[in-house]
């Protein structure tokens, strides 16, 4: 009986998936047809009239799915996703509602990022919209720019900043409160870290020369095949934080790393990153990433300005580093 139930349920899922894919492909074909056959070389005002006319005819025959605003979305869909083969592939795993969230994104790289993230992480439409609103692509790009060619394998794994707005912490909170809040909302935090992270332990105890040391959070990343040590710091990044993380990573490499694993890497989360110190210390060479955490999401314009500034600074640092390498 269980096999029969599974057979029926799997078939139902396939039918729903196939129907959704077919509908998405239909909408793309309609949008592409109107765009290339009807609107090609048309004046703006005349084009608007054509869309309205086509919409009325389709709506009268097939229903509200083809009202003017939806037809315009189909046209935008064909414009933004011009490669039909990619649309076919994506439509097997993303719903039309997912595409509606992706269509307004202007950057091809950004759209591709969110589409892939949605598939790999199984994002609902609501979660996809949340990730777009939180600028997940820009933050991942910002973090990647901190990493040089020596650590390209980490690309897309970390973010900067980490938006811990779900913590709802008041000003003046203690580091213990932050750790406690992160544990309380652990699923959210793992999602914020990205696909592939598995939680191992909080306050990992290490005994070195008879003295106890405690690592805030220890994760494992399946794709990297590495332990990931995470330290949370109140205030700005300080140079001594690097030494502490290096000690933890060497201990983990000696006592916790399995034979088939790569050396552990570290993530230091600070309330404020000291960019010049991080550059001078060349953190990436020791497998250490530094990122900021924010305890609330700022207004969209402020977030965009902060990310833009961070990206410009990161690119400038990389250019300076490349110039120094060429001259030495």
Image (tube, grey):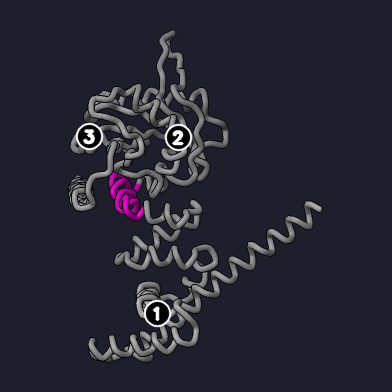
Residue occupying the point 43% across, 61% down: 115
Instruction: Report crowding for label 2: few under 14, some 14 to 19, many 20 or more residues within 10 A (C-alpha).
Output: some
Give the extent of the magenta segment: 131-149
N-term-proximal mark, 3 vs 2 = 2
- Residue where numbered disc 1 is placed: 67
Q: Picture coordinates of residue 23 (x, y %)?
A: 52, 74
User: On residue 186, which mark appears?
Assistant: 2
Vertical comparison of 6 with 283: above or below: below
User: On residue 272, which mark appears?
Assistant: 3
Q: Residue lying furthest top in this view?
A: 210
Q: Is residue 252 magenta?
A: no
N-term-proximal mark, 3 vs 1 = 1
Residue occupying the point 20% across, 38% down: 275
Towards the viewer: 99 or 222: 99
> Nearer the observer, disc 3 or disc 1?
1
Residue occupying the point 46% across, 18% down: 205
Vertical comparison of 244 with 47: above or below: above
CA gap, disc 3 and disc 1 = 49 Å
The secondary element bearing badge 2 is classed as: helix
User: On residue 113, which mark appears?
Assistant: none
Q: Picture coordinates of residue 59 (x, y %)?
A: 44, 84
Residues at marks 2 and 1 touching, judged by CB atoms closer than 8 Å = no
Query: Is residue 141 among the parts visible in the rendering?
Result: no
């Amino acid at each position: 009986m269980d096999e029969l139930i599974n057979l029926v349920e799997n078939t139902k899922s396939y039918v729903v998936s196939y129907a959704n894919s077919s509908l998405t492909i239909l909408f793309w074909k309609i949008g592409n047809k109107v765009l290339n056959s009807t609107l090609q070389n048309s004046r703006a005002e005349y084009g608007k009239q054509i869309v309205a006319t086509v919409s009325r005819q389709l709506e009268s025959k097939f229903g509200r799915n083809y009202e003017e605003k939806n037809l315009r979305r189909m046209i935008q869909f064909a414009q933004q996703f011009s490669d039909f083969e990619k649309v076919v592939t994506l439509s097997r795993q993303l719903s039309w509602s997912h595409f509606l969230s992706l269509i307004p994104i202007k950057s091809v790289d950004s759209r591709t990022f969110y589409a892939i993230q949605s598939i790999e992480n199984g994002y609902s439409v609501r979660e996809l919209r949340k990730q777009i609103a939180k600028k997940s692509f820009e933050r991942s790009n910002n973090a990647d720019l901190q990493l040089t060619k020596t650590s390209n394998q980490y690309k897309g794994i970390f973010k900067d900043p980490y938006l811990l707005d779900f913590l709802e912490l008041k000003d003046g909170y203690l580091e213990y409160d932050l750790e406690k809040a992160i544990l309380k909302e652990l699923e959210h935090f793992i999602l914020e870290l990205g696909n592939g992270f598995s939680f191992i332990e909080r306050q990992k105890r290490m005994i070195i020369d008879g003295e106890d040391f405690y690592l805030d959070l220890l994760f494992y990343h399946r794709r990297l095949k590495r332990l990931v040590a995470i330290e949370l710091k109140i205030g700005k990044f300080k140079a001594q934080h690097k030494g502490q993380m290096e000690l933890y990573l060497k201990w983990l490499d000696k006592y916790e790393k399995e034979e088939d694993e790569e050396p552990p890497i570290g993530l230091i989360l600070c309330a404020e990153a000291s960019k010049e110190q991080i550059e001078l210390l060349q953190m990436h060479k020791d497998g250490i990433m530094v990122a900021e955490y924010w305890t609330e999401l700022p207004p969209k314009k402020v977030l965009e300005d902060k990310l833009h500034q961070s990206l410009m600074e990161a690119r400038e640092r990389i250019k300076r580093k490349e110039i120094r390498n060429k001259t030495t």
